[in-house]
Amino acid sequence: MKKNRFYFIASLLLFLLPLIRIFIIKARGLWLIDFAAYSAVSRALFEGSNPFPDNCDALFCQFGGTVPIVYPGHMLLFALPGFIWGDVIQIVYLVLNVAIIYFLTGLTLIKACGYKWRDLFVPGAKQLGYALCCFCFFSSNNVMTMMRTGQIVLILALCLYCMFWGPASRCLRVLLFAFIAVTKYSVLTVFAPLLFFKRHWKLCLTAFAVFLLLSVSPILCGNNLKEVYFGYFKAVGILFQPGQVNHFDMSPQMCHLGFFKISIINHILKALVIGLVLWLFWRERKTGYFSDTLMMLALSCTMLISYHGLHDVSLLFPLFFIRLFDFARNRRWKLFCVTALFPLYLDIPGAVTLTVSSWLGKIPGVDAVVYLSNRPWGSNYMHVFPITPFFAVALALWSLYLYLHVKDPYLFKFFEESEGNVK
Protein backbone atom coordinates (compact mmCIF):
# COMPACT_ATOMS: atom_id res chain seq x y z
CA MET A 1 0.00 0.00 0.00
CA LYS A 2 2.80 2.45 0.91
CA LYS A 3 4.60 1.54 -2.29
CA ASN A 4 1.50 2.28 -4.38
CA ARG A 5 1.07 5.58 -2.52
CA PHE A 6 4.65 6.53 -3.37
CA TYR A 7 4.09 5.71 -7.06
CA PHE A 8 0.83 7.69 -7.06
CA ILE A 9 2.33 10.81 -5.44
CA ALA A 10 5.48 10.70 -7.60
CA SER A 11 3.43 10.25 -10.79
CA LEU A 12 1.01 13.02 -9.79
CA LEU A 13 3.89 15.46 -9.26
CA LEU A 14 5.45 14.57 -12.60
CA PHE A 15 2.08 15.11 -14.30
CA LEU A 16 1.34 18.43 -12.58
CA LEU A 17 4.68 20.27 -12.52
CA PRO A 18 4.82 20.89 -16.30
CA LEU A 19 1.20 22.09 -16.25
CA ILE A 20 2.02 24.60 -13.53
CA ARG A 21 4.98 25.80 -15.57
CA ILE A 22 2.81 26.24 -18.66
CA PHE A 23 0.22 28.14 -16.62
CA ILE A 24 2.92 30.48 -15.29
CA ILE A 25 4.20 31.11 -18.81
CA LYS A 26 0.70 31.83 -20.08
CA ALA A 27 0.01 34.12 -17.10
CA ARG A 28 2.87 36.32 -18.29
CA GLY A 29 0.79 37.17 -21.34
CA LEU A 30 3.13 35.73 -23.96
CA TRP A 31 1.53 35.87 -27.41
CA LEU A 32 1.10 32.80 -29.60
CA ILE A 33 2.52 34.66 -32.57
CA ASP A 34 2.78 31.70 -34.98
CA PHE A 35 -0.74 30.45 -34.33
CA ALA A 36 -1.93 34.05 -34.60
CA ALA A 37 -0.25 34.21 -38.00
CA TYR A 38 -1.98 30.99 -39.18
CA SER A 39 -5.32 32.41 -38.08
CA ALA A 40 -4.83 35.96 -39.39
CA VAL A 41 -3.57 34.88 -42.82
CA SER A 42 -6.38 32.35 -43.15
CA ARG A 43 -8.98 34.95 -42.19
CA ALA A 44 -7.53 37.49 -44.62
CA LEU A 45 -7.64 34.98 -47.48
CA PHE A 46 -11.19 33.94 -46.49
CA GLU A 47 -12.19 37.61 -46.78
CA GLY A 48 -10.50 37.85 -50.20
CA SER A 49 -7.58 39.97 -48.98
CA ASN A 50 -4.01 39.12 -50.00
CA PRO A 51 -1.75 39.24 -46.89
CA PHE A 52 1.53 38.62 -48.77
CA PRO A 53 3.67 40.63 -48.34
CA ASP A 54 2.73 44.25 -49.17
CA ASN A 55 -0.25 44.20 -46.81
CA CYS A 56 1.86 42.56 -44.12
CA ASP A 57 2.58 45.63 -42.01
CA ALA A 58 -1.06 46.65 -41.88
CA LEU A 59 -2.30 43.14 -41.10
CA PHE A 60 0.40 42.10 -38.64
CA CYS A 61 1.29 45.29 -36.80
CA GLN A 62 -0.38 43.80 -33.73
CA PHE A 63 1.94 40.78 -34.00
CA GLY A 64 5.14 42.82 -34.19
CA GLY A 65 5.11 43.51 -37.93
CA THR A 66 6.66 40.17 -38.85
CA VAL A 67 6.29 38.89 -42.40
CA PRO A 68 3.94 35.89 -42.43
CA ILE A 69 5.12 32.68 -44.10
CA VAL A 70 1.87 30.80 -43.63
CA TYR A 71 1.06 28.53 -46.57
CA PRO A 72 -2.15 29.78 -48.30
CA GLY A 73 -3.56 26.24 -48.32
CA HIS A 74 -4.20 26.71 -44.59
CA MET A 75 -7.19 28.93 -45.32
CA LEU A 76 -10.01 26.44 -44.71
CA LEU A 77 -8.25 24.95 -41.68
CA PHE A 78 -7.55 28.12 -39.69
CA ALA A 79 -10.05 30.74 -40.87
CA LEU A 80 -12.46 30.09 -37.98
CA PRO A 81 -9.85 30.77 -35.24
CA GLY A 82 -9.00 33.94 -37.14
CA PHE A 83 -12.57 35.22 -36.85
CA ILE A 84 -12.88 34.44 -33.13
CA TRP A 85 -9.25 35.09 -32.12
CA GLY A 86 -8.83 35.86 -28.44
CA ASP A 87 -8.05 34.30 -25.06
CA VAL A 88 -10.46 31.40 -25.67
CA ILE A 89 -8.64 30.24 -28.80
CA GLN A 90 -5.27 30.50 -27.06
CA ILE A 91 -6.52 28.42 -24.13
CA VAL A 92 -7.97 25.84 -26.53
CA TYR A 93 -4.59 25.68 -28.31
CA LEU A 94 -2.71 25.08 -25.05
CA VAL A 95 -5.21 22.49 -23.77
CA LEU A 96 -5.08 20.65 -27.10
CA ASN A 97 -1.28 20.45 -27.01
CA VAL A 98 -1.29 19.25 -23.41
CA ALA A 99 -3.82 16.55 -24.30
CA ILE A 100 -1.75 15.48 -27.32
CA ILE A 101 1.37 15.01 -25.19
CA TYR A 102 -0.48 12.83 -22.67
CA PHE A 103 -2.28 10.84 -25.37
CA LEU A 104 0.63 10.43 -27.81
CA THR A 105 3.02 9.36 -25.05
CA GLY A 106 0.52 6.82 -23.75
CA LEU A 107 -0.21 5.57 -27.28
CA THR A 108 3.51 5.11 -27.91
CA LEU A 109 3.99 3.07 -24.74
CA ILE A 110 0.95 0.91 -25.53
CA LYS A 111 1.65 0.29 -29.20
CA ALA A 112 5.43 -0.12 -29.06
CA CYS A 113 6.65 -0.60 -25.47
CA GLY A 114 4.53 -3.40 -24.04
CA TYR A 115 2.13 -1.28 -21.96
CA LYS A 116 -1.61 -1.80 -21.57
CA TRP A 117 -4.16 0.98 -21.16
CA ARG A 118 -4.71 0.11 -17.48
CA ASP A 119 -0.97 0.64 -16.79
CA LEU A 120 -1.45 4.36 -17.46
CA PHE A 121 -4.07 4.74 -14.73
CA VAL A 122 -3.12 2.22 -12.02
CA PRO A 123 -0.41 3.38 -9.55
CA GLY A 124 2.76 1.39 -10.04
CA ALA A 125 6.14 1.31 -11.72
CA LYS A 126 4.64 1.44 -15.22
CA GLN A 127 2.49 4.46 -14.41
CA LEU A 128 5.57 6.17 -13.00
CA GLY A 129 7.39 5.39 -16.25
CA TYR A 130 4.53 6.94 -18.20
CA ALA A 131 4.56 10.03 -15.97
CA LEU A 132 8.34 10.35 -16.38
CA CYS A 133 8.03 10.19 -20.17
CA CYS A 134 5.30 12.86 -20.13
CA PHE A 135 7.45 15.02 -17.84
CA CYS A 136 10.44 14.67 -20.18
CA PHE A 137 8.27 15.49 -23.18
CA PHE A 138 6.59 18.49 -21.51
CA SER A 139 9.78 19.92 -20.02
CA SER A 140 11.81 19.87 -23.22
CA ASN A 141 13.01 23.26 -24.34
CA ASN A 142 11.58 22.74 -27.82
CA VAL A 143 8.08 22.02 -26.50
CA MET A 144 8.15 24.99 -24.15
CA THR A 145 9.27 27.20 -27.05
CA MET A 146 6.42 25.82 -29.13
CA MET A 147 3.93 26.57 -26.33
CA ARG A 148 5.13 30.17 -26.27
CA THR A 149 5.13 30.79 -30.00
CA GLY A 150 2.06 28.80 -31.06
CA GLN A 151 3.59 26.27 -33.44
CA ILE A 152 1.43 23.24 -34.37
CA VAL A 153 4.18 20.60 -34.39
CA LEU A 154 2.44 18.36 -31.84
CA ILE A 155 -0.70 18.27 -33.99
CA LEU A 156 1.50 17.15 -36.89
CA ALA A 157 3.15 14.52 -34.66
CA LEU A 158 -0.26 13.16 -33.68
CA CYS A 159 -1.25 12.93 -37.35
CA LEU A 160 2.04 11.26 -38.31
CA TYR A 161 1.87 8.47 -35.72
CA CYS A 162 -1.88 7.98 -36.07
CA MET A 163 -1.23 7.21 -39.74
CA PHE A 164 0.21 3.94 -38.42
CA TRP A 165 -1.51 3.50 -35.05
CA GLY A 166 -4.91 5.00 -35.76
CA PRO A 167 -7.98 3.21 -37.13
CA ALA A 168 -7.07 1.13 -40.18
CA SER A 169 -8.89 3.44 -42.60
CA ARG A 170 -7.21 4.39 -45.85
CA CYS A 171 -9.37 7.52 -46.09
CA LEU A 172 -8.28 8.67 -42.64
CA ARG A 173 -4.60 8.11 -43.48
CA VAL A 174 -5.01 10.15 -46.67
CA LEU A 175 -6.55 13.04 -44.75
CA LEU A 176 -3.87 12.92 -42.05
CA PHE A 177 -1.09 12.82 -44.64
CA ALA A 178 -2.63 15.70 -46.60
CA PHE A 179 -3.04 17.74 -43.40
CA ILE A 180 0.66 17.32 -42.60
CA ALA A 181 1.58 18.32 -46.15
CA VAL A 182 -0.51 21.47 -46.28
CA THR A 183 0.32 22.68 -42.76
CA LYS A 184 4.05 21.98 -42.94
CA TYR A 185 5.24 20.40 -46.16
CA SER A 186 8.90 20.70 -45.04
CA VAL A 187 8.26 17.84 -42.58
CA LEU A 188 7.74 15.52 -45.57
CA THR A 189 10.99 16.33 -47.39
CA VAL A 190 12.27 12.79 -46.83
CA PHE A 191 9.24 10.95 -45.46
CA ALA A 192 6.94 11.48 -48.47
CA PRO A 193 9.42 10.31 -51.17
CA LEU A 194 10.37 7.40 -48.91
CA LEU A 195 6.70 6.44 -48.66
CA PHE A 196 6.49 6.56 -52.45
CA PHE A 197 9.66 4.47 -52.88
CA LYS A 198 8.07 1.90 -50.58
CA ARG A 199 5.27 1.64 -53.15
CA HIS A 200 2.47 3.20 -51.11
CA TRP A 201 1.45 4.88 -54.35
CA LYS A 202 -2.28 5.16 -53.72
CA LEU A 203 -1.77 6.84 -50.37
CA CYS A 204 0.80 9.30 -51.76
CA LEU A 205 -1.13 10.24 -54.90
CA THR A 206 -4.49 10.58 -53.16
CA ALA A 207 -3.02 12.68 -50.36
CA PHE A 208 -1.26 14.84 -52.95
CA ALA A 209 -4.58 15.40 -54.72
CA VAL A 210 -6.14 16.56 -51.42
CA PHE A 211 -3.10 18.79 -50.86
CA LEU A 212 -3.62 20.40 -54.28
CA LEU A 213 -7.31 20.98 -53.58
CA LEU A 214 -6.50 22.73 -50.30
CA SER A 215 -3.73 24.69 -52.00
CA VAL A 216 -6.11 26.17 -54.57
CA SER A 217 -8.93 26.69 -52.06
CA PRO A 218 -8.21 30.48 -51.68
CA ILE A 219 -9.66 30.91 -55.17
CA LEU A 220 -13.08 30.07 -53.69
CA CYS A 221 -13.03 33.41 -51.87
CA GLY A 222 -12.03 35.46 -54.90
CA ASN A 223 -8.27 35.49 -54.34
CA ASN A 224 -5.88 35.70 -57.27
CA LEU A 225 -3.77 32.56 -56.83
CA LYS A 226 -0.86 33.93 -58.83
CA GLU A 227 -0.62 37.05 -56.69
CA VAL A 228 -1.13 35.14 -53.42
CA TYR A 229 1.57 32.55 -54.09
CA PHE A 230 3.97 35.08 -55.60
CA GLY A 231 3.65 37.11 -52.39
CA TYR A 232 3.96 33.98 -50.23
CA PHE A 233 7.25 32.85 -51.77
CA LYS A 234 8.53 36.42 -51.67
CA ALA A 235 7.75 36.50 -47.94
CA VAL A 236 9.56 33.20 -47.44
CA GLY A 237 12.60 34.59 -49.22
CA ILE A 238 12.59 37.70 -47.04
CA LEU A 239 12.70 35.74 -43.79
CA PHE A 240 15.80 33.78 -44.84
CA GLN A 241 17.86 36.86 -45.57
CA PRO A 242 20.54 38.11 -43.11
CA GLY A 243 19.00 40.12 -40.31
CA GLN A 244 15.63 38.31 -40.52
CA VAL A 245 14.17 35.99 -37.87
CA ASN A 246 14.85 32.75 -39.79
CA HIS A 247 18.51 33.49 -40.46
CA PHE A 248 21.29 32.23 -38.18
CA ASP A 249 22.50 35.74 -37.35
CA MET A 250 19.14 36.30 -35.65
CA SER A 251 18.08 32.88 -34.38
CA PRO A 252 20.39 30.14 -33.02
CA GLN A 253 17.45 27.70 -32.85
CA MET A 254 17.50 26.62 -36.50
CA CYS A 255 18.37 22.97 -37.25
CA HIS A 256 19.09 23.00 -40.98
CA LEU A 257 22.53 23.16 -42.55
CA GLY A 258 23.13 26.84 -43.24
CA PHE A 259 25.03 28.10 -40.21
CA PHE A 260 28.51 28.22 -41.78
CA LYS A 261 29.50 31.62 -43.18
CA ILE A 262 31.31 29.95 -46.08
CA SER A 263 28.37 28.87 -48.24
CA ILE A 264 30.25 26.08 -50.01
CA ILE A 265 30.54 24.18 -46.70
CA ASN A 266 26.76 24.28 -46.25
CA HIS A 267 26.25 23.08 -49.83
CA ILE A 268 28.73 20.19 -49.46
CA LEU A 269 27.13 19.04 -46.21
CA LYS A 270 23.64 19.20 -47.71
CA ALA A 271 24.86 17.22 -50.74
CA LEU A 272 26.19 14.52 -48.39
CA VAL A 273 22.85 14.34 -46.56
CA ILE A 274 20.93 14.18 -49.85
CA GLY A 275 23.25 11.39 -51.00
CA LEU A 276 22.51 9.51 -47.77
CA VAL A 277 18.77 9.99 -48.33
CA LEU A 278 18.94 8.68 -51.92
CA TRP A 279 20.83 5.61 -50.68
CA LEU A 280 18.12 5.20 -48.04
CA PHE A 281 15.40 5.29 -50.69
CA TRP A 282 17.14 2.57 -52.71
CA ARG A 283 17.84 0.39 -49.68
CA GLU A 284 14.23 0.58 -48.43
CA ARG A 285 12.38 0.31 -51.73
CA LYS A 286 11.33 -3.34 -51.32
CA THR A 287 9.57 -3.15 -47.95
CA GLY A 288 6.26 -1.51 -47.03
CA TYR A 289 6.95 -1.06 -43.32
CA PHE A 290 8.93 1.62 -41.48
CA SER A 291 11.28 0.68 -38.65
CA ASP A 292 11.52 3.15 -35.79
CA THR A 293 15.22 3.64 -36.58
CA LEU A 294 14.37 4.39 -40.22
CA MET A 295 11.76 6.92 -39.12
CA MET A 296 14.26 8.58 -36.79
CA LEU A 297 16.90 8.76 -39.52
CA ALA A 298 14.43 10.08 -42.13
CA LEU A 299 13.13 12.82 -39.83
CA SER A 300 16.66 13.70 -38.66
CA CYS A 301 17.84 14.12 -42.25
CA THR A 302 14.77 16.23 -42.97
CA MET A 303 15.79 18.61 -40.18
CA LEU A 304 19.13 19.17 -41.93
CA ILE A 305 17.95 19.51 -45.53
CA SER A 306 14.98 21.86 -45.25
CA TYR A 307 14.12 24.73 -42.92
CA HIS A 308 13.38 23.53 -39.40
CA GLY A 309 13.56 25.01 -35.94
CA LEU A 310 14.27 23.23 -32.66
CA HIS A 311 10.54 22.91 -31.96
CA ASP A 312 10.26 20.43 -34.87
CA VAL A 313 12.36 17.90 -32.94
CA SER A 314 9.15 17.28 -30.95
CA LEU A 315 8.25 14.87 -33.77
CA LEU A 316 10.97 12.51 -32.56
CA PHE A 317 9.97 12.04 -28.91
CA PRO A 318 7.85 8.90 -29.51
CA LEU A 319 10.84 7.39 -31.33
CA PHE A 320 13.14 8.28 -28.41
CA PHE A 321 10.75 6.49 -26.04
CA ILE A 322 10.57 3.39 -28.25
CA ARG A 323 14.36 3.11 -28.42
CA LEU A 324 14.92 3.78 -24.71
CA PHE A 325 12.34 1.21 -23.58
CA ASP A 326 13.72 -1.37 -26.01
CA PHE A 327 17.32 -0.83 -24.90
CA ALA A 328 16.33 -0.99 -21.23
CA ARG A 329 14.32 -4.17 -21.78
CA ASN A 330 17.31 -5.82 -23.49
CA ARG A 331 19.86 -4.37 -21.04
CA ARG A 332 21.78 -2.59 -23.77
CA TRP A 333 22.84 0.16 -21.42
CA LYS A 334 25.51 1.81 -23.56
CA LEU A 335 23.02 2.37 -26.37
CA PHE A 336 20.44 3.46 -23.80
CA CYS A 337 22.75 6.08 -22.30
CA VAL A 338 23.82 7.59 -25.62
CA THR A 339 20.23 7.74 -26.90
CA ALA A 340 19.06 9.30 -23.63
CA LEU A 341 21.51 12.18 -24.11
CA PHE A 342 19.33 13.65 -26.87
CA PRO A 343 16.05 14.07 -24.93
CA LEU A 344 18.09 15.05 -21.85
CA TYR A 345 19.78 17.82 -23.82
CA LEU A 346 16.38 19.07 -24.91
CA ASP A 347 15.29 19.19 -21.27
CA ILE A 348 18.09 21.63 -20.37
CA PRO A 349 16.47 25.07 -19.74
CA GLY A 350 16.90 27.49 -22.62
CA ALA A 351 18.66 30.04 -20.40
CA VAL A 352 21.41 27.50 -19.70
CA THR A 353 22.01 26.61 -23.34
CA LEU A 354 21.99 30.29 -24.32
CA THR A 355 24.56 31.05 -21.61
CA VAL A 356 26.84 28.22 -22.75
CA SER A 357 26.33 29.28 -26.39
CA SER A 358 27.36 32.84 -25.47
CA TRP A 359 30.59 31.53 -23.92
CA LEU A 360 31.33 29.48 -27.04
CA GLY A 361 30.66 32.49 -29.23
CA LYS A 362 33.46 34.41 -27.50
CA ILE A 363 36.13 31.92 -28.62
CA PRO A 364 38.58 33.90 -30.82
CA GLY A 365 37.97 33.37 -34.53
CA VAL A 366 34.71 31.42 -34.19
CA ASP A 367 32.69 34.33 -35.64
CA ALA A 368 34.65 33.96 -38.89
CA VAL A 369 33.42 30.37 -39.29
CA VAL A 370 29.78 30.36 -38.17
CA TYR A 371 26.99 32.88 -37.75
CA LEU A 372 26.58 34.19 -34.20
CA SER A 373 23.29 35.60 -32.95
CA ASN A 374 23.11 38.81 -30.94
CA ARG A 375 20.11 39.39 -28.69
CA PRO A 376 17.98 36.60 -30.21
CA TRP A 377 14.27 37.25 -29.61
CA GLY A 378 15.15 40.45 -27.77
CA SER A 379 17.12 38.66 -25.03
CA ASN A 380 20.28 39.98 -23.37
CA TYR A 381 22.54 37.24 -24.75
CA MET A 382 25.35 38.21 -27.11
CA HIS A 383 27.56 36.21 -29.51
CA VAL A 384 25.28 33.17 -29.31
CA PHE A 385 26.93 30.13 -30.95
CA PRO A 386 24.53 27.93 -33.03
CA ILE A 387 24.56 24.79 -30.87
CA THR A 388 21.21 23.59 -32.24
CA PRO A 389 22.38 22.62 -35.77
CA PHE A 390 25.33 20.73 -34.27
CA PHE A 391 22.82 18.89 -32.07
CA ALA A 392 20.79 18.10 -35.21
CA VAL A 393 23.89 16.76 -37.01
CA ALA A 394 24.79 14.58 -34.01
CA LEU A 395 21.21 13.28 -33.90
CA ALA A 396 21.34 12.36 -37.60
CA LEU A 397 24.68 10.53 -37.18
CA TRP A 398 23.42 8.61 -34.15
CA SER A 399 20.19 7.76 -36.00
CA LEU A 400 22.27 6.40 -38.88
CA TYR A 401 24.25 4.25 -36.43
CA LEU A 402 21.05 2.87 -34.89
CA TYR A 403 19.55 2.25 -38.32
CA LEU A 404 22.55 0.14 -39.32
CA HIS A 405 23.12 -1.70 -36.02
CA VAL A 406 19.76 -2.28 -34.29
CA LYS A 407 18.90 -5.82 -35.34
CA ASP A 408 15.30 -6.00 -34.07
CA PRO A 409 13.73 -2.56 -34.46
CA TYR A 410 10.08 -1.78 -33.90
CA LEU A 411 8.14 -1.91 -37.18
CA PHE A 412 5.42 0.56 -38.14
CA LYS A 413 3.11 -1.02 -40.71
CA PHE A 414 0.27 0.02 -43.00
CA PHE A 415 -2.11 -2.93 -42.98
CA GLU A 416 -2.99 -2.91 -46.68
CA GLU A 417 -2.65 -6.47 -47.80
CA SER A 418 -4.52 -5.74 -51.02
CA GLU A 419 -1.76 -3.43 -52.18
CA GLY A 420 0.74 -6.23 -51.83
CA ASN A 421 3.45 -4.00 -50.36
CA VAL A 422 3.72 -5.25 -46.79
CA LYS A 423 6.31 -7.99 -46.56
Image (spheres, rainbow, N blue to C red):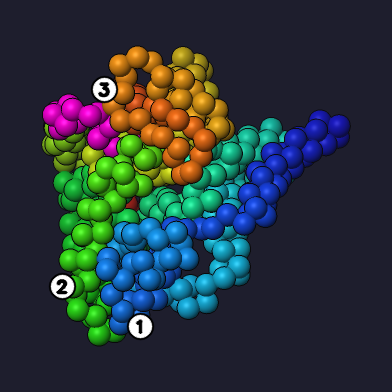
- How far apart marks 3 and 2 lie (CA) works out to 41 Å
Q: Earlier in the sequence, mark 1 or mark 2?
A: 1
- For disc 3, the marked residue is 368
Q: Earlier in the sequence, mark 3 or mark 2?
A: 2
Residue at point 27%, 68% (across, down): 54
- How far apart marks 1 and 2 lie (CA) works out to 17 Å
The amino acid type, in three-letter code, at marker 3 is Ala
* The magenta stretch spans residue 259: yes
The amino acid type, in three-letter code, at marker 1 is Glu
Residue at point 62%, 39% (across, down): 135
The amino acid type, in three-letter code, at marker 2 is Lys
**Mark 1 touches mark 2? (CB < 8 Å):** no
Q: Position of residue 279 (x, y in %)?
A: 14, 32
SS label for mark 1: loop
Q: Left or right of 371: which side holds 103?
A: right
Identity of the residue furthest to the right in this view: 2
- Residue 401 falls in which quadrant of the image? top left
Residue 120, numbered label: none
SS label for mark 3: helix
Residue in front for this viewpoint, 114 or 322? 322
Q: Earlier in the sequence, mark 3 or mark 1?
A: 1
* The magenta stretch spans residue 387: no
Q: Left or right of 23: which side holds 369?
A: left
Question: If the image is split into quadrants, where does the C terminus sit?
Answer: top left
Residue 47, numbered label: 1
Q: Is residue 401 above or below residue 257?
A: above
The residue mark sitting in front, 3 or 1, is 3
Question: If the image is split into quadrants, where does the N terminus sit?
Answer: top right
- For disc 2, the marked residue is 226
Residue stretch rendered in magenta on the structure: 255-268
